[in-house]
Amino acid sequence: MKGLVTKAVGGFFFVADEQQNIIRTRIRGKVKRKVYPGDFVKVNDAMIEKLYPRTNLLFRPAVANVDQVLVIHSIQNPPFARKMLDKFLIMVEAIGVKPVIIINKIDLKVPDIELEKEMKDYKEEGYQVYLISVKEKMGLNELYLTLEEKLSVLAGPSGVGKSSLIKALVPEARVKIGEVSQKLKRGVHTTRHVELLPINKGGWIADTPGFSALDLRGILSENLRFYFPGLARYEGQCKFRGCTHTHEPGCQVKKAVKEGMISEKRYNSYLNIYRDLEEREC
Ligand SMILES: Nc1nc2c(ncn2[C@@H]2O[C@H](COP(=O)(O)OP(=O)(O)OP(=O)(O)O)[C@@H](O)[C@H]2O)c(=O)[nH]1
Ligand SMILES: [Zn+2]
């Protein structure tokens, strides 16, 4: 059978079939490459015989074949911060995985934030945006649908509700199993093993969130424009090849900002982060 590795621990690999039934396997010595959660493998007699090629491999958490990263922020506690959200989006874009924006805690009333308006820019740029409250179970059904048939990883700053969301999404019994095995593991190992948890109709979510700390190391200012979909659309249309859309004459991006085709806030965010990166590169 072809299966999905959900967890690798102590020389064992837990592999799920299409119905999300999980069996414990070992691996044949002839499979030389390291196998990660998210990998597709061929299993015979509870032995992994083959590793299928992967589309990507994330680090921290180490998960293969990630379909989307759910970038979660909260409206309050911690307060919503656009620059922070933009940086998370850049990180996900840079690894070539699709980001999905989630704003949590919409049950908290914040008079000076018009969330719908704030999110309009992102939607126009092509991002899926979900406004939810894990606490009040608002918006979760809609979110559920985007998780079908996909492997998702959560990312976002501390305290925004990542663990709460995972618990809300994964059926009760499965979470309990996860918690028990977590306790058992702690006694034996100190390392944290990523586990993929089944959600719905072939959907999986990693129980360990990705990069909660933010740094854009490895991202060059000259490449930043590719990680803003609204700007990337104009690639090759400016007067100068490799135009960074910052100071060059004949820039179609700047023109589009003036004409209201590109969100001014998003463009300013680009300039702001561009300068941060440039400063670091000096
Ligand atoms: N008001 C409100 N509080 C929430 C909601 N979701 C989560 N919280 C609370 O926010 C706090 C942080 O939630 P966690 O799920 O631990 O957040 P996290 O992102 O996993 O945090 P880290 O583990 O630090 O990365 C907890 O006190 C939750 O009860 C929500 O929808 N509304
Ligand atoms: Zn330009």
Image: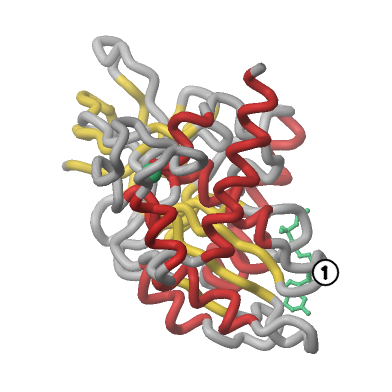
Asked if disc 1 is less than 8 Å from ligand 1, the answer is: yes
Q: Would residue 71 appear left or right of 282 to someone viewing this image? A: left
Give the quarter of the image for residue 177.
bottom right
Q: Would residue 193 appear left or right of 51 to someone viewing this image? A: right
Badge 1, how many Cα within 10 Å: few under 14, some, many 20+? some
- Which residue type carries mark 1? Asn
Q: Residue at x 63, y 20 (%)?
A: 281
Q: Quadrant of the N terminus?
A: top left
Q: Residue at x 36, y 62 (%)?
A: 203
Q: Quadrant of the C terminus?
A: top right
Q: Would residue 133 appear left or right of 66 to someone viewing this image? A: right
Picture layout, residue 177 above or below residue 40: below
231 or 180, which lies in front? 231
Is residue 24 visible in the rendered image? The answer is no
> Dot 1 lies on which element?
loop
Q: Would residue 150 appear left or right of 142 to someone viewing this image? A: left
Q: Residue at x 38, y 68 (%)?
A: 261
Q: Residue at x 53, y 41 (%)?
A: 91
Q: Position of residue 25 (x, y in %)?
A: 36, 33
Give the quarter of the image for residue 3.
top left
Instruction: Name the residue tied to disc 1.
Output: 77
Q: Position of residue 219 (x, y in %)?
A: 53, 29
